[in-house]
Image: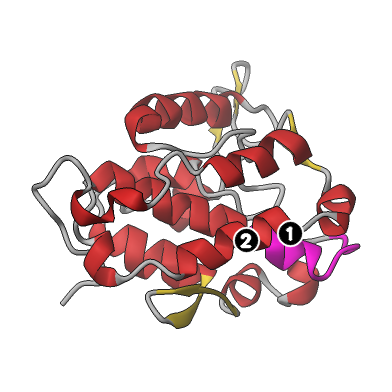
Amino acid sequence: RPAVARSEREDGGDAAEFDHSHASFGQVLEQFVKRGLVDYAGLKANPMTLQGYLDRLGEVSTEDFGKWTENQQLAFLINLYNAATLRSVIERYPVRSIKAFGGTRAGASNQPVLRIFGKKVSLRDLEEKMIGNDFNEPACHFALACAARSCPELRDEAYVADKLRDQFIDQGRRFLSAPDKNSVDLKKRIVYLSPIFKWYREDF
């Protein structure tokens, strides 16, 4: 059975007590993220709100998760990924690159750094096995901020179900227009694309 269970209920069902505004994570992002850059030193000195948010997400059961709408599920998983990435970095900060504590891009993301549905999983498991396998949404690749220069920038707001499509569109535009990630050489007639389009070519 897949990790993500769908529900046709549109109101979130019995799990309505969960804060789908992700307000506490939004506070973290608003305080420590400016124009896509993260104040890791400041966040490391004040990690309590971030840790409390991750603890709350770790308490959600598969049963409650299955009662949510698809957008609520997606927002939950994307915010979990981004929040866990932030915690993973500040636990080792100062560090020059996320690769410094993983050896490679794959190594960094293969470490079990987050708790979900009663077990510890890696960022890669969350990205590929849970989000990638259970949702047909390539735009998620523009929303998952892995703390590497090649990855999309982190928003200064949490993803929320009722704005998710607009947030995806905005993230896609930001990522595609970032000259350090994608560019066009008109003279040579060459388009240079981010490695993301190679890593996840089947999704695109």
Q: Relative to 172, is 88 above or below?
A: below
Q: Residue furthest top?
A: 186
Query: Looking at the image, do the residues carrying marks 2 and 1 touch, with CB atoms under 8 Å apart?
Result: yes
Q: From this viewpoint, is residue 204 visible?
A: no
In the figure, is residue 29 to the left or right of 131? right
Q: Residue at x 59, y 72 (%)?
A: 106
The foreground one among 117 and 48 is 48
- Choose between 150 and 32: the one closer to the eye: 32
The answer to whether residue 110 is magenta is no
- How far, Cα to Cα, is label 2 from label 1? 6 Å
Q: Which residue is mark 1?
A: 48
Q: From what the image shows, is residue 167 above or below residue 43? A: above
Residue 202: percent from left, percent from top: 31, 53
Nearest to the observer: residue 46 or residue 101: 46
* Residue at point 32%, 70% (across, down): 61
Callout 1 amino acid = Met
Q: Residues within 10 Å of mark 2 (few under 14, many from 20)?
A: few
Is-magenta flag for residue 93? yes
Residue at the spot of label 2: 52
Q: Position of residue 187 (x, y in %)?
A: 63, 16
- Asked which secondary structure carries label 1, the reply is helix
Q: Which residues are magenta?
A: 85-96
